[in-house]
Amino acid sequence: MAERPVASSIALIACFEEDDGNGVLAAAAGLSDDARAATWQALRVRLCAVPDSEQRQGLTGQAWSERVRTWALLALAVGPVDVVKRVGSYVYLHPPVTDVERVLASRSREWRQAFTEATLRAEAGETEVGLFGPLWWDLWRRFRELAGALQPDDTSPGYLVLMVRGLLFSGSIVDAVGADLQLTERSIWFLFEPAAGVQKALLGAERYWNPANTWRVALVRLALAGVLDRQRLADAATAAAGDGRMGRNHRSWYRRIPQLLADPRLLPREAGHGPPPPGNQL
């Protein structure tokens, strides 16, 4: 265990005890690596514990929100790069985005890069996908808000899985892409590269929800509307369908896209918008 620098580490622990999120923000910029490590060691068990009703007892909604904000900011300020896996997604989702950006700015560039990669792995590795439900849309939007601070690789499998799940639960993939056209420049085209987790996420929507709001249908509709290049989409799907590095079921998913482009009458009728219900295994 690292020797605890008395002033900074004790002050942070006091912020934790007093639910003082602003105190964490004020202290974060001047923390040494030793102080961060010592504070994490001192508070790790409590920060990683799942909040229960006893911890909330006697607190107003606002007081409880401030407590969670303080825990989240403190975990980001002193935790290891895999803090999201250890503590939970709320560490970057609950506090205001400006607070998260301030704490992230206090960490080294190397830490932020490793944190980004570890966070994407943790989110993409979540197996109980349906239980998160609309939370995927919240996670995706927050990650996009933090893009400047995190600078994620927008072609990495973890990023693409989060995109696939997030937009699926947005209510309309077509509308979500239309509102974020930057996705059409790079990220969407990497959905056609072999990555088992990405293909599994794409197929999940086909099996368990509204057939009019799946990624395959959305890609075709985006091409028909001129948002995506129609010929490029057909070529990318054809290449993926013949890519032996993918599983047979994954290749068949892509094979259907040129057929739908050639005959849009095969597309399912558009139904009311809406995300998949909680509980689906996507």
Image (tube, rainbow, N blue to C red):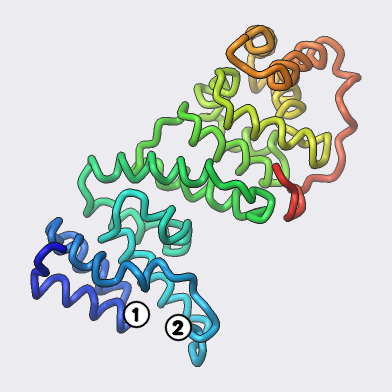
Q: Is residue 19 left or right of residue 78?
A: right
Specify the label residue 44 is tagged with.
Answer: none
Seen from the viewer's position, the closer of residues 154 and 47 is: 47
Determine whether 123 is above or below 87 in the image: above
The residue that appears at 47% across and 80% down in the rendered structure is 64
For image coordinates 65% across by 31% down, the residue present is: 200
- Residue in view at x 40 percent, y 41 percent: 147
Q: Residue 88, position in %: x, y? A: 46, 59
Mark 2 residue crowding within 10 angstroms, few (<14) / some (14–19) / many (20+): few
Relative image position of residue 6 (x, y in whole percent): 9, 74
Q: Position of residue 16 (x, y in %)?
A: 30, 77
Tell me the kind of residue under disc 2.
Ala
Compare residues 198 and 19 and report the one nearer the observer. Answer: 198
- For disc 1, the neighbor class at 10 Å (few under 14, some 14 to 19, many from 20) is many
Question: Tag 1's secondary structure?
Answer: loop
Asked whether 153 or 5 is in front, the reply is 5
Q: Quadrant of residue 202?
A: top right
Give the residue drawn at x 62%, y 9%. Answer: 244
Residue 19's label in the rendered image is 1
Q: Which image quarter holds the N terminus?
A: bottom left
| Quadrant of res 232 | top right
Mark 1 vs 2: CB contact within 8 A: yes
Question: Which image quadrant is residue 152 in?
Answer: top left
Which amino acid, by three-letter code, is at mark 1? Answer: Asp
Residue projecting furthest to the front: 1
Mark 1 or mark 2: whose residue is earlier in sequence: 1
- Residue to which mark 2 is pinned: 63
Query: Where the C terminus falls, by quadrant?
Result: top right
Q: Gap in Å between the C-alphas at discs 1 and 2?
A: 8 Å
Measuring from the top left, give residue 215's x and y in whole percent. 70, 30
Apparent side of residue 174 relative to residue 105 in the rendered image (left or right): right
